Image (spheres, rainbow, N blue to C red):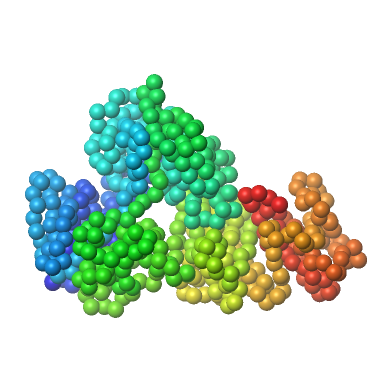
Amino acid sequence: MKIIIVGGVAGGASCAARLRRLDEKAEILMVERGPYVSYANCGLPYHVGGSIEKESSLLVATEQTFRESFAMDCRTSCEAVGISTNDKTVQLKNHATGKVTTEKYDKLVLSPGAAPIRPPLPGIDLPGIFSVRTVPDARCIREWLDKGTAECVGMNSYTGCQTVTKPKQAVVVGGGFIGLEMVENLVHRGLEVTLIERLNQVMPPLDPEMARLVERYMVKHGVKLELNDGVAGFERAADGSLQVITASGKKHPADIVILAIGVKPETALAKMAGLELGQRGGIRVDEQMRTSNPDIFAVGDAVEVKDFVTGQWTLIPLAGPANRQGRIVADVICGRNSRYRGTQGTSICQIFDGTIAQTGASEKVLTQLGDKDFEKVYLYPNSHAGYYPGAKMLVIKFLFRKSNGRVLGAQVLGEDGVPKRIDSFAMAIQMGCTIYDLEESELCYAPPYGSAKDPVNFAGMVAANILRGDMPVCHWDSVDSGFLLDVRNPPELAVESVPGALNIPLPQLRARLGELPRDREILIICRSAQRAYYATRILLQNGFKAKNISGGMLSRSHLPNPV
């Protein structure tokens, strides 16, 4: 059997390697139009910033590795330019020689990835405007940052440009993962950075109130944010630098511009083969990554997948899912009954000293789908035992089903311990766990790493208290009609208070119950909702109607418009 794999990064490379491990006799041909196979494109921003100094460190495996270790035909700078499903052939163009050859296949695997969006804006091809997708892209950006010019030829057009002074100002267009990673690494290189985002928040997959915290953190580190303003074009200033013109008419000076607007699936080959595309623009595949043609599979950023939580078709360009999909295709080709469960969007991003991570469904996605069977809680636990030096506050937004307690999603922000928690939430979602499972999860504990009640346990316990009726909860967007009770101590109110709230410090509450109304719902406030929980229990057991405002003053602080 002969298998041709088009695309030698992530999904394609994983498929090729596993194919060989499963079938020593299969004839495997993997082609990659770029100069490298199996490189870590997720590391490109960090190579630009200098954290990954050697370009060779990005190369996970080479063309020679696949030829010698896996005994397969591996060709770089070789592009698939045509597919005939009737003849089961692929036309391949060697970019070094220009020669086009035709290869027959029994099974074809498409792993073309996704291309950076580069809209036809005025001036977008001016020197100094870069996209970030390949190792040569990162090389060009580093060269430009080091010298003020670039002489490489690739997907971007940088030749024939004049020499300018070493860049001091950068503009990054787009506030997604690549955009934020590039912002951080450009700041590390000493540049003044402006981030322009057309939407009203950075990190679009996040819920807005969590994105607010990311934005404030970036501003704290000297980044200038321009939200709700898209780019309209680029022009060359009199001194040779660039100017980025936005839809509002603002002009932002720049010595270098990074386009991180997003990516779109590479579907040209799929269209040639007459394959079905989905409504989101990606290649439609089944659970075994098989396309509408039974002899053609597709993996990676070019395919539409089912969201593991919502069941909706979606595009999620992440390396982890692409690698797993490649393995599944190899299994299926070799006769194994492997199936892809779906993608839940587990992702993480470093932002200076902090980390933002997420998994599963967000509140805004559930709301857009008309899903009302969910509840959310905000938690602010320490990353490890508070008595051990270095503990940092974690900000956690946790979503779960009201009907059965199933874990739906989580977003975590902090400077310590974020990966450990998001991975726990991610596995809980993957295994169909409930909040009651999180209550009972046995997670590692030692003072430098966690607490006896880990934040993941804590999330399960808080959520379970809600569903058991022990702690009715509400949120700041629904406090208009309630009676507000603040159980913090007076010195705390001197720092921040809520107009109209009655203050009864928690230690005095039992003695002052007569001051509270019995004919109104009492909404209870403290700093993080823990003391408010204690107060809620007191009031409920004394015949009052009471609810805890989830997250307390801390969750109020990152609302777009605090009540």
Quadrant of the drawing holding the N terminus: bottom left
Residue found 34% across the figure and 24% down from its top: 164
Residue 475 position, x and y percent, is 68, 61
Residue found 65% across the figure and 75% down from its top: 467
Residue sitting farthest toward the top: 238
Camera-nearest residue between 272 and 89: 272
Name the side, left or right, on which 52 lies relative to 32.
Answer: right
Camera-nearest residue between 138 and 276: 276
The answer to whether residue 445 of the structure is visible from this angle is no
Residue 337 position, x and y percent, is 29, 78
Q: How many labels sit on residues?
A: 0
Residue 134 position, x and y percent, is 29, 46
The correct choice, above or below, for 287 with respect to 103 in the image is below
The correct choice, above or below, for 428 with respect to 224 in the image is below
Name the side, left or right, on which 64 lies relative to 556.
Answer: left
The answer to whether residue 149 of the structure is visible from this angle is yes
Residue found 79% across the figure and 67% down from its top: 521
Residue 281 position, x and y percent, is 34, 59
Residue found 73% across the figure and 64% down from its top: 548
Name the side, left or right, on which 106 lies relative to 378.
Answer: left
